């Protein structure tokens, strides 16, 4: 009996050392839903995590609006959104929020003879295209930015998201910062009253439309453009430099972020200063309830992201995402300890 008790004590101590509580004696598969922006890396992490631990993570790539709705309805263990919720919205809904990955949104085009990164844009030109003011590819505003490039006189087909989308939030937030007309007429949000264009569902849908429609332009998370070998554009940043999207320029945009001083870690990374900064960068956020009805599931969600922060950096970089810095992951763990509790008020992360 004493020996059995000692073994139980050793196991309990090991569980605490791994940051898991007594509620996780039996692992459970977890579910999440939301942003399509981080789907490629979440899928890669989930596959690796399943091999390492035996625990599955099923993520539905349905858009940030759907992810927010599903977590509020308590139909998933976590929601995901590329638009951070404001502190008052988190408090009202009883939610906790933390960033999980950083990446970038890029303009993509279907133009014959145009290679990835070859076409240059400024923010105001992108805004005027999406406002429907620039209607043809050989418009002077585009041609002046691209001397030497042979641009067709073809009409521009604008492709945008049809669903509530954090990628749309990042795109429209950027356009609102660089174009007063866009800010006044359209504004920023996960869904807006688009002046122009055809709608595709998810990053996948926008990429598919642009691949099919000659003369089209869209916006997607960079991993989708890279995976599908699509021609993305270079964009002029706040410091006047034309930059290419990659993990280095996304990291440059995130370098000055004040995560600790921003409620709910809700930092928006569009139009950041810095010569190397990609102008349409952003973090993707995870939403969980502070008071958990299913504590075992909540612990498994935290274990999954803790493992991903510690083991998933190389996988993230291979897809040109920026992994969460170590200092930020420690701040996130502290937030878990302070905020995510069971029904009795006991912290679920040790």
Image (spheres, grey):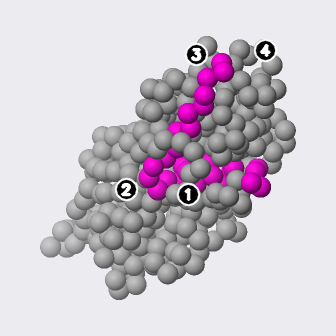
Between the C-alphas of marks 2 and 3, the distance is 36 Å
Q: Secondary structure at mark 2?
A: strand
Residue 141 picture quarter: top right
Sequence-wise, the earlier of marks 4 and 3 is 3
Q: Secondary structure at mark 4?
A: loop
- The image shows residue 18 at horizontal and vertical percentages of 40, 59
Q: Secondary structure at mark 1?
A: loop
Residue 105 visible (yes or no):
yes
Between the C-alphas of marks 4 and 3, the distance is 15 Å
Establish if 230 lies above or below 44. above
The residue pinned by badge 1 equals 192
The residue pinned by badge 3 equals 112
Front residue of 232/289: it is 232
Q: Secondary structure at mark 3?
A: loop
Between the C-alphas of marks 1 and 4, the distance is 36 Å
- The image shows residue 93 at horizontal and vertical percentages of 46, 78
Q: Nearer the viewer's eye, disc 2 or disc 3? A: 3
Segment tinted magenta in the rendering: 152-181
The residue pinned by badge 4 equals 148
Sequence-wise, the earlier of marks 1 and 4 is 4
The residue pinned by badge 2 equals 33
Front residue of 332/2: it is 332
Sequence-wise, the earlier of marks 4 and 2 is 2
Establish if 56 lies above or below 331. above
């Amino acid at each position: 009996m004493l020996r059995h008790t000692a073994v139980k004590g050793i196991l309990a101590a090991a569980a605490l050392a791994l940051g898991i509580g007594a509620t996780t004696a039996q692992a459970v598969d977890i579910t999440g839903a939301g942003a399509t922006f981080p789907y490629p890396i979440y899928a890669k992490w989930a596959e690796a995590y399943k091999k390492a631990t035996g625990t599955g993570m099923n993520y539905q790539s349905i858009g940030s609006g759907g992810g927010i709705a599903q977590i509020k309805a308590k139909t998933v263990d976590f929601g995901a959104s590329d638009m951070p919720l404001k502190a008052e919205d988190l408090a009202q809904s009883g939610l906790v929020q933390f960033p999980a990955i950083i990446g970038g949104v890029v303009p993509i085009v279907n133009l014959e003879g145009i290679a990835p990164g070859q076409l240059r844009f400024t923010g105001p030109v992108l805004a005027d295209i999406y406002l429907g003011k620039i209607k043809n590819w050989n418009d002077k505003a585009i041609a002046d930015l691209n001397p030497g490039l042979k641009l067709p006189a073809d009409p521009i087909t604008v492709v945008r998201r049809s669903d509530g989308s954090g990628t749309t939030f990042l795109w429209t937030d950027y356009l609102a910062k660089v174009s007063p007309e866009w800010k006044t007429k359209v504004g920023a949000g996960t869904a807006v009253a688009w002046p122009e264009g055809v709608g595709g569902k998810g990053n996948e849908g926008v990429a598919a439309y642009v691949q099919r429609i000659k003369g089209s332009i869209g916006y997607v998370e960079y991993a989708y453009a890279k995976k599908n070998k699509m021609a993305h554009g270079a964009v002029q940043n706040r410091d006047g430099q034309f930059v290419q999207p990659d993990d280095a320029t996304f990291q440059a945009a995130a370098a000055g972020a004040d995560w600790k001083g921003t409620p709910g870690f809700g930092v928006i990374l569009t139009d950041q200063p810095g010569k190397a900064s990609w102008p349409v960068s952003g973090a993707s956020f995870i939403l969980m309830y502070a008071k958990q009805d299913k504590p075992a599931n909540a612990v498994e969600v935290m274990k999954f992201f803790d493992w991903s922060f510690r083991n998933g950096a190389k996988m993230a970089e291979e897809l040109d995402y920026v992994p969460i810095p170590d200092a930020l992951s420690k701040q996130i763990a502290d937030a878990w300890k302070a905020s995510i509790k069971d029904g009795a008020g006991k912290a679920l992360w040790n």
